[in-house]
Image: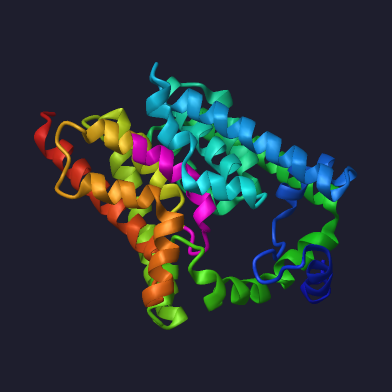
Amino acid sequence: FDIEVFDPLQDLAAKSSGVLYWHYPPTFVALIYPLGHLSPGAALAWFTVLTVLVWGVTVYVMIDTKSWIERLPVLLCPAVYMTIIGGQNGAFTAALLCLFILGVVRNRDWMIVVACTLLLAKPHFGVLMPVVLIALQRYRAFALSALFGSAFLGWSVWMTGIEYVEAFFANAASIEGKISASTLIDKQHTLFSFLSSLNVPQGIALGLQSLLALGIIGLTWVTFRSERLSQDLKVAYFLIGSVMISPYAFIYDGAAAVIGMWYLHRGTREAPIPGQNLIIALAWLMPYVNRWVHERVDVSWAGLSMLFLLAILIVHVRREMVAKPT
């Protein structure tokens, strides 16, 4: 697990460089371990089939409507198309975030525990999970998630070996530099990527991203503590907020946000704010719009579009909290 050795091997095997850097914790390796016994082609084929199935089931369960026409925009969103053709894992991240929020809404602790445990494979997207559980005083689910999560982490470290863990942290600085490079900025949807595309110094960009993350955490607490807000807005806020916290989140990770957009649209269709539907449409088209904008003005639209979505959510949250009686 030496990134300097990995680079030439990647170039030789995949004829590509710059976007395939492997840097996942041992928990992710534990999840995909069975695929490691297959040939690369067979592993990718099975991973792709599983991705499509997981995404289809997630959309079917989350988009609770009898009309498949309403499901199609989510089912066929560009972010998931990128996930599938690139062999990426954004659909699994979305599925686990959706499983968690379903567990919260339906009061199913086992869903919460499974989602929290398995999302340790990509823990930077699970930051809001404990905040939601504590805000709702779901201490049993919190404790069980901590217990099973610790067991899963311990088993993963045992399976991969302590050397893998040491290499994971040793390579962190190198990987961070590569992800922050200009060639990858336009493939991310964070405030950090937007500011970096404007040549804001990295320290300042990371500082502002951290402030945004703290703000999202605080608003999550307020949102889920409130009994005035509709369930649709809470679901939308959780899914969109979860993929905005980390400074490093790629556009394919925005699959969860697409489901959040659907809930935002449904929950506010009676009184949308001016320009809301246009912003949602452009965010849905994020991979294409972002590339088009970046090629012309060298700015990452994706990060800005996510900020617009968050702003729309905050406006509606404030409206409902002010308008509805105690």
Query: Which stretch is magenta?
Result: 246-262
Q: Does residue 56 appear left or right of residue 193 in this picture?
A: right
Q: Residue 110 appears in which quarter of the rendering? A: top right
Q: Residue at x 45, y 80 (%)?
A: 203
Q: Residue at x 52, y 63 (%)?
A: 248
Q: Does residue 291 appear left or right of residue 304 in this picture?
A: right
Q: Nearer the viewer, residue 183 or 76?
A: 76
Q: What secondary structure predominates along the stretch shown in magenta?
A: helix
Q: Does residue 166 appear left or right of residue 115 in this picture?
A: right
Q: Residue furthest top?
A: 66
> Is residue 167 placed above or below 48 in the rendered structure?
below
Can residue 225 be seen by looking at this rendering? no
- Confirm whether the magenta stretch covers residue 289: no
Q: How many marks?
A: 0
Query: What quarter of the picture does the N terminus occupy?
Result: bottom right
State how the image is colored.
rainbow
Q: Residue at x 70, y 66 (%)?
A: 21
- Confirm whether the magenta stretch covers residue 260: yes
> Is residue 45 placed above or below 2 in the rendered structure?
above
Q: Residue at x 56, y 26 (%)?
A: 57
Query: What quarter of the picture does the C terminus occupy?
Result: top left
Q: Nearer the viewer, residue 144 or 53?
A: 53
Can residue 222 be seen by looking at this rendering? yes
Q: Does residue 107 appear left or right of residue 154 in this picture?
A: left
The percent coordinates of residue 112 (x first, y second) are 54, 31
The percent coordinates of residue 214 (x first, y second) are 37, 59
The percent coordinates of residue 225 (x first, y second) are 30, 36
Q: Nearer the viewer, residue 6 or 80?
A: 80
